[in-house]
Amino acid sequence: MKTYIDCLPCFMSQALRAGRIATKDETKIKALLDDVGCMIKDIPMDSTPPETGKMIYQRVTEITGVKDPYKKIKESNINEALALYPKLKQIVKNSPDKLLTAIRIAIAGNTIDLGLNREFNILEDLNKILKQDFAIFDYEEFTSQLEKAKSILYIGDNAGESVFDKILIEELGKPTTYVVRDIPVINDATIEDAINSGLDEVAEIISSGTTAPGTILKLCNNKFLHRFNNAELIISKGQGNYEGLSNVQRSVFFLLIAKCHVIANDLNVKENDIVLKANGSIIQRHRQPM
């Protein structure tokens, strides 16, 4: 996905928010905003938003000296999600379509996004998404590919939602590789975060090698690229991964909430819609099964 004009003020907001979390020194925050402002004027609009995000969060670390400003917040999100885990498992167990319910739960976890100036309540969002219609619902294609696949490449997003991803991975019932970021960036999951969420119990965990808040193939390591190019089924979670992978010539299933109007417009859905989208698929708007 390209960068849109409305992404530019969002970049500044992200820099300010991350700067304030990292430090109370307003001199450093001002220096960060000055730096990012100069950077933004030279951004190629055909680049993806995560490529700019990579530069922004690198400058946050360099200017504030804090490598993982969201660390405590991530830990809190993971602990909150882990406390819900038994309830989530019971919801799946009691569902007439366990796989679809697990997909809904995984998407609900995508509400935990600290890159956006957006409030969230995990329980409220979960209860809503368990009943919400999909704006794009390529479920038949997903189940068809899942049935044929011997293994799965699952590209994770935020740290807290990785607990929700675990629910889905357990329901998929296939050997799964779970992909995380190489270093801390916003509240995206790293290997440490994924282990704290219990993903090592159900999947092999690898880093994509990227330091961007999204999967940009040209920034990824060879191990990930080999897995990506040879995977039988790829699941991509969240907006950042959609921004980076939406134009790749590869079958990918995107699971996400359209949390901003830019993403919603790119997908041709409404803001806050939920999406299960196969690359190149046609939007379906009929009522979905609960």
Image (cartoon, helix red, strand yellow):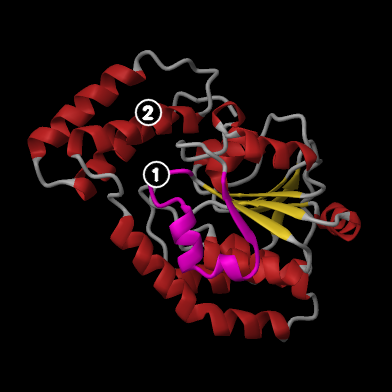
Front one among 24 and 9: 24
Q: Secondary structure at mark 2?
A: helix
- For the image, the number of numbered tags is 2
Whether residue 290 is visible, yes or no, is no
Residue 119 picture location, percent across and down: 37, 58
The answer to whether residue 215 is magenta is no
Residue 55, numbered label:
2
Front one among 109 and 62: 62
The answer to whether residue 199 is magenta is yes
Marks 2 and 1, how far apart at CA: 10 Å
Whether residue 230 is visible, yes or no, is yes
Under mark 1, the amino acid is Val
Q: Is residue 121 above or below residue 2?
A: below
What quarter of the picture does the N terminus occupy? top right
Quick one: which residue is furthest to the front in this view? Answer: 223
Q: Quadrant of residue 14?
A: top left
Residue 185, numbered label:
1
Front one among 71 and 177: 177
Question: Which residue sits at x=79%, y=40%?
Answer: 230
Q: Secondary structure at mark 1?
A: loop
231 lies left or right of 206 = right
What quarter of the picture does the C terminus occupy? bottom right
